[in-house]
Structures are given as C-alpha cells and as structure tokens.
Image (tube, helix red, strand yellow):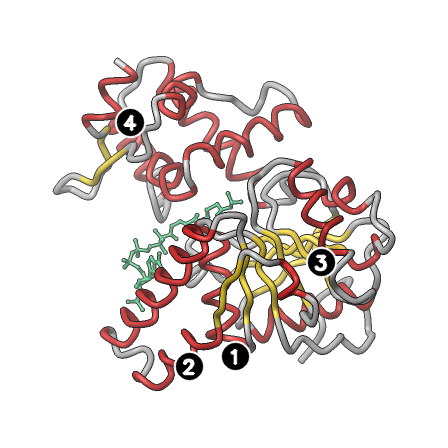
C-alpha cells in the first residue's frame, strides 16, 4: 500500500508486546483494541490495584458484549481477555516493544512516567503518549533517548473512531514514525502525521466549536437550545454529550492547554468548572427527540 505523505521509507520495528500505562477510560480502551486488533499480549499498570482490576473487568465485559452482538465468537473473546494482563509493578514492561501512556493529563506526571520507563525498557522501545494537548517534545526532552518518543492520539470511543494522530517532535526517529504507522495499520485505524503542536489538529478545530457552545451555555442559553441550533450541522453527537463522553475534567484540561497556547479564542467554561468542582460527571441525558438536556444534578449546580 502507498505510504501517506511524510512517512519515512524505513522498516518498522517489530511490535510483539504492548504496554499501556494507566487504567482509566482511555487506557482500558487502548488495552482492548491492542489485544483485539493486533493480537499481541498487552500489559497494563496503575498505581492502584483496584484501578487495574476495574480496567481488566471492563475489558472482560466489552469482550462478552461483542460475543452477544455476534462480532466475536466465544473463543476469540476469551483469547482477547487472556492477552490483557494487569499489574501495579512496572517491571512487566521490561520486554515490551511499545509502551503507550494514558495517565492523568499533566506534563509532570507524564514526564515522570517516561523517565521511570526508560530505566525498565530497552533502548529502542517506542514510548508513545496518548496526550490530547500537552507537548510531546517537553515529555521527551530530559530522556536519554528522546528519539523514541512519539504522540499516538486516539479518539473516544476508541473501538469506533478510525483516526489516530501520530505526532512527531523534531527528535522523533524515522524508525519510530514508521513503527507508529505500522501499528496503526495493524489496529485497522487511519493514521495522520502531525507536528507536535498543542492539541495537534482535531482538538484544535473541535475545541473551537466546543468553546463557542460552552460560551453560549455560560451566557445563559439552555444546552437543549444550543443542540437544536446546531442540528443543521449534523454533528454525530451534541457538544455537551461529547464533553460528557470525554470526561469533564479531561475536556477542561484540553481547553486550558489550548487557551494558554492560543489565547482567548478558546473558552474555559465557568459552568463546566463548577460542575467539575461539584463532582458531577453526568451532564446531559437524551430526550425522546434525541436532543440533550441537562441532568437534574447538573441543573442544581449551574442555575
Ligand atoms: N464502544 C464500542 N462501540 C461503540 C461505542 C463504544 N463506546 N459507542 C458506539 N459504538 C458502536 C455501536 O455499537 C455501533 O456499532 P454497529 O453499527 O456495528 O452496531 C456504532 O458504534 C454506532 O453506534 P450507535 O448507532 O449506537 O450510535 P451513533 O450512530 O450515534 O454513533 C458515535 C456513536 C460513533 C460515538 C457517534 O456519536 C460519534 O461519532 N460521536 C462523536 C465522537 C467524537 O467526536 N469523538 C472524538 C472525541 S474527542 C477525543 O476523543 C479526543 C480527546 O483527546 C479529548
């Protein structure tokens, strides 16, 4: 197959085992998709054993849902589940060829994860980040081998969304880029090569729209009205549903990163912050017409 523009013509490294760092929403989805599509062993770790257990249970549930829907037969589902193992001990990454981190969206946390990994993995293991908006360059700059660091950005829900943004820094090696493209094709995803820049491409465009939707909401327009007004755009999902699916704190972090890089055209919503502070996670529900309206919990906070 023809290589997309900018992809180096070098032989990709072999990826026979994948590590996922973290056990949250994205990490669990990544573990599933690597085990299912690439059919390689996947090790996942988190600081807390309960979070690891929760991620593994989620993978099991998703595999059995796919059996119910006829997408996998029971043997295939069992094989997927068996490929994913979890631990709190990061030495399980020692023989991984690719480790992708999906931990808390904070630069210092991600830098520490990569520094710890460098002490465990071999010198050419690819270190990938699923960051939405932090600098991949900054994550790599203090490492001994910054050339193996690459952005590998998936979209929610990972099983369905075809795109992966592969973000290269000025240091990223040709082998790492070629390997990332090879992995994306083994995952049956569509990779695009972007430069490392705040939020790459998709979130820069998407969060402009989301910013204005939230600005209208903060200005006093009901979410239902915003949704109805945007209907002619035929978005796959209401902006507020999308916020909820991504997770309110993650969405807020992405907007904050964009605002600090690009200024006030990105809008950090006061309503959203109030909801996050109050611990609200369910922002909207769908009505009979398929439009979203605020949940009772959310209405109590923002009105
Ligand atoms: N996991 C697995 N499969 C799922 C799923 C999930 N969470 N959600 C939906 N699906 C599957 C369904 O099973 C169905 O498959 P089938 O056709 O084979 O039966 C298919 O997807 C379509 O689902 P539905 O008919 O239930 O619903 P929709 O047609 O409304 O599609 C959607 C759901 C694909 C999620 C669609 O609403 C959509 O594309 N929404 C926008 C998503 C988006 O923009 N994501 C990007 C977020 S930004 C991001 O992640 C970046 C981060 O950095 C912040």
Alpha carbons under labels 1 and 2: distance apart: 9 Å
On the image, numbered disc 3 is attached to which residue? Answer: 127
Q: Is mark 1 within 8 Å of ligand 1?
A: no
Q: Nearer the viewer, mark 4 or mark 3?
A: 3
Answer whether labels 4 and 1 touch (C-beta < 8 Å).
Answer: no
Q: Secondary structure at mark 1?
A: loop
On the image, numbered disc 2 is attached to which residue? Answer: 79
Q: Toward the viewer: 75 or 120?
A: 120
Q: Secondary structure at mark 4?
A: helix
Q: Nearer the viewer, mark 1 or mark 2?
A: 2
Q: Is residue 63 above or below residue 25?
A: below
Alpha carbons under labels 4 and 3: distance apart: 40 Å
On the image, numbered disc 4 is attached to which residue? Answer: 223
- Determine which quarter of the picture holds residue 166: bottom right
Pick whichever of labels 4 and 1 is earlier in the sequence.
1
Q: Toward the viewer: 62 or 161?
A: 62
Residue 208 position within the rendered picture, expressed as x and y whole percent measured from the top left: 52, 31
Q: Secondary structure at mark 2?
A: helix
Q: Secondary structure at mark 3?
A: strand
Pick whichever of labels 4 and 3 is earlier in the sequence.
3
Pick whichever of labels 1 and 2 is earlier in the sequence.
1
Q: Residues within 10 Å of mark 3 (few under 14, many from 20)?
A: many
């Amino acid at each position: 197959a023809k290589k997309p523009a900018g992809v180096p013509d070098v032989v990709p490294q072999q990826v026979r085992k994948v590590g996922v760092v973290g056990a949250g929403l994205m990490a669990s989805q990544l573990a599933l998709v690597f085990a299912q599509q690439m059919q390689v062993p996947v090790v996942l770790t988190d600081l807390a054993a309960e979070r690891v257990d929760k991620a593994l249970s989620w993978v099991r549930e998703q595999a059995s849902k796919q059996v119910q829907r006829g997408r996998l037969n029971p043997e295939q589902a069992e094989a997927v589940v068996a490929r994913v193992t979890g631990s709190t001990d990061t030495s399980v990454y020692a023989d991984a060829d690719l480790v992708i981190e999906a931990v808390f969206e904070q630069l210092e946390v991600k830098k520490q994860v990569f520094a710890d990994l460098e002490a465990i993995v071999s010198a050419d293991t690819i270190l990938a980040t699923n960051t939405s908006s932090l600098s991949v360059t900054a994550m790599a700059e203090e490492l001994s081998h910054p050339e193996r660091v690459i952005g590998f950005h998936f979209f929610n829900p990972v099983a369905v969304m075809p795109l992966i943004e592969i973000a290269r820094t000025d240091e990223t090696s040709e082998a790492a880029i070629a390997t990332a493209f090879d992995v994306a094709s083994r995952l049956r995803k569509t990779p695009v090569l972007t430069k490392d820049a705040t939020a790459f491409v998709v979130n820069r465009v998407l969060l402009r729209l989301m910013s204005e939707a939230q600005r209208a909401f903060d200005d006093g327009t009901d979410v239902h009205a915003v949704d109805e007004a945007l209907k002619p755009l035929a978005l796959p999902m209401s902006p507020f549903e999308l916020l909820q699916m991504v997770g309110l704190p993650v969405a807020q972090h992405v907007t904050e990163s964009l605002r600090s890089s690009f200024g006030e055209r990105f809008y950090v919503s006061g309503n959203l912050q109030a909801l996050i502070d109050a611990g609200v996670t369910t922002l909207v529900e769908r009505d009979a017409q398929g439009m979203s309206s605020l949940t009772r919990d959310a209405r109590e906070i923002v009105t």
